[in-house]
Image (tube, rainbow, N blue to C red):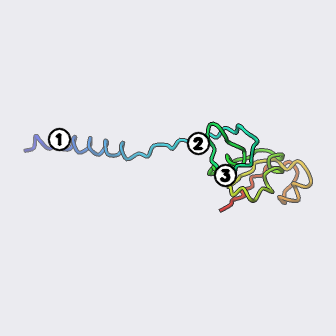
């Protein structure tokens, strides 16, 4: 019987290895939205290849990362989007310094979560 023990140990190790390889979660694919229209009149629609406005793309995204003060200025007031938006920008002007309570030329990461 002692001759079977190494074989059984190897089979058990192989089975454990195969189980661990199968149990590794696969990375999820990120969705890519291509904004192809400025027509924002169709409420309740979803982005597809033929029609995708910026508002629809933002509403379908799990998280929007926006870079720069111009994007902050444009999107910060859009509370009706219902989207989670993170802004990355530099405080390059006095209004930003006051709004974010920071000094000049400081990096800012601001998170505005709808949920």
Residue at x-position 70% and y-position 49%: 42
Residue at x-position 31% and y-position 42%: 18
Q: Is residue 90 left or right of residue 24?
A: right
Q: Secondary structure at mark 3?
A: helix
Q: Which residue is mark 3?
A: 59
Q: Which residue in the rendered view is the most extreme toward the front?
A: 42
Q: Secondary structure at mark 2?
A: loop
Residue 31, which numbered label?
2
Q: Nearer the viewer, residue 26 or 53?
A: 53
How many other residues sit within 10 Å of disc 1, few (<14), some (14-19) or many (≥20)? Answer: few
Q: Give the mark nearest the N terminus, 1 or 2.
A: 1
Residue at x-position 85% and y-position 59%: 99
Q: Give the mark nearest the N terminus, 1 or 3.
A: 1
Q: Which residue in the rendered view is the most extreme toward the left?
A: 1
Q: Are marks 1 and 2 in contact (CB under 8 Å)?
A: no
Give the image location of residue 2, x and y in percent.
10, 44
Q: In this rendering, is residue 78 above or below 46?
A: below
Q: Secondary structure at mark 1?
A: helix
Q: Is residue 38 left or right of residue 105?
A: left
Q: Nearer the viewer, residue 26 or 47?
A: 47
Residue at x-position 84% and y-position 60%: 101
Residue 48, which numbered label?
none
How many other residues sit within 10 Å of disc 3, few (<14), some (14-19) or many (≥20)? Answer: some
Q: CA distance from mark 1 to mark 3?
A: 58 Å
Quarter of the image where the N terminus is located: top left
Q: Which residue is mark 1?
A: 6
Asked which quadrant contains residue 7, the reply is top left
Q: CA distance from mark 2 to mark 3?
A: 13 Å
Q: In this rendering, is residue 82 above or below 88?
A: below
Q: Is residue 30 left or right of residue 42?
A: left
Q: Give the mark nearest the N terminus, 2 or 3.
A: 2
């Amino acid at each position: 019987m002692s001759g079977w023990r190494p074989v059984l140990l190897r089979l058990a190790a192989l089975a454990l290895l195969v189980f661990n390889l199968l149990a590794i979660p696969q990375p999820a694919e990120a969705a890519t939205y291509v904004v192809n229209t400025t027509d924002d009149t169709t409420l309740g629609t979803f982005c597809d290849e033929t029609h995708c406005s910026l508002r629809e793309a933002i509403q379908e995204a799990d998280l929007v990362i926006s870079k720069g003060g111009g994007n902050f200025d444009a999107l910060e007031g859009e509370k009706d989007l219902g989207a989670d938006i993170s802004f990355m920008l530099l405080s390059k002007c006095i209004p930003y310094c006051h709004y974010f309570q920071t000094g000049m030329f400081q990096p800012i990461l601001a998170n505005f979560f709808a949920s």
